[in-house]
Amino acid sequence: MRRSRFTLGTVAALSAAILFALGLAACGGDDDSSSSSGGGGGGSGGGGKTIALLLPETKTTRYEEKDRPIFTQKVKELCPDCKVFYQNASQDPNKQQQQAEAAITNGASVLVLDAVDVKSVGPIVQHANQKKIPVIAYDRLIPDQDIAFYVSFDNVKQGRVQAQSLLDKLGSGAKGKSIVMVNGAPTDPSAGDYKKGAHQVFDKSGLKIAKEFDTPDWSPDKAQLQMDQSITSLGKDGFVGVYSANDGMAGGIIAAMKGAGIDPKTKPVTGGDSEAAAIQRILTGEQLSTIYLAIKQQAETSAQLAVDAAHGKMDPSGLAKAKVDNGAKQVPSVLLSPIAVTKDNIQDTVIKDGFLTTDEICTGKYQAACKEAGIE
């Protein structure tokens, strides 16, 4: 009889293990999701923990090209036995809800969550808290919820830096003239912060904001349509520059200008995220500036907090030195500083830090512009 009970118990245990493995595979099998094993050596030790990284969308290239691989590599370094359960919601809050539930079901010890819509993720945070799973808000602050940490940038400062770069380029002679503002997604609190910071500069500058848009999904296509409408309404000579909150939208704005027969070199456009395409446009004069965010530092810091939290250690290294009020608590936070990037400091920022390489930037028709800027 004992042998019979032992056999049944063994079968049950094996079945549970197989189901768990199948669950991970099922949730990580499409183009937007994957589950990665840790490897390498590290300081926080092993333990076979699962760390969920839930990112919001793919239209902004940084998430797949930078945040995901940097975060995953750092987890591998810190915790050889840990697994990264990765999902991308493709700008769908319902999909993100399902992905978070799958992560919890499949045994995640911590959620690193960059919300598609911060107002809709309350149930995710509440369910995680019920299971005693810490939630780290990544890049976008989640309001009115009990989150463990927040890792992002000083977003209001970023808006000010972006706006100031445009103001500096236009000079004092632009007082009384008009600009267009193309802000980010209204569901993203970071976009609201950038907008707030930009207005702190523009509202006392003497510039007129002739048209202003909030752009759903941070969509370059929608930004292009908004710029088309602005050109139709204001005329080709009815504005002197454009504030764009990120590089993807800047690309759409510049495409609209070209389509209308406007040389973008005559209408400075800001951006953000330091995408390779934006750096190339800056080198050729089509875009004025972008923002360098130390995404490597953001992703690696988040990985450190996540690995520690997965092992029941809440920031033993004291990384989260700031406090941000999210309406529910003073959230321990890591806030990094944004840097404006123009043609003059590409070498000393994105290239020096290894964020982008010369091979990524100085391709084909951009080789001459790179040489002229001293980038070789």
Image: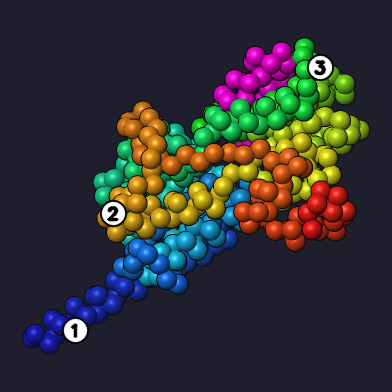
State the image quarter where residue 242 is shown. Answer: top right
State the image quarter where residue 272 is shown. Answer: top right
Q: Which residue is mark 2?
A: 313
Q: Is residue 23 visible?
A: no
Query: Does residue 130 appear to the left or right of 319 in the view shown?
Result: left
Q: Using the image as rendered, state which of residue 52 and residue 3 is in the foreground.
A: 52
If you read the primary sequence from the N terminus, does the residue marked by circle 3 or circle 2 appear first? Answer: 3
Q: Which residue is mark 3?
A: 173
Residue displayed at 84% across by 54% down = 371
- Position of residue 6 relative to residue 337, above or below, is below
Residue 205 part of the magenta segment? yes
Q: Quadrant of the C terminus?
A: bottom right
- Amino acid found under the numbered disc labelled 2: Lys
- Mark 2 residue element: loop
- Mark 1 residue element: helix
Q: Position of residue 69 (x, y in %)?
A: 55, 60
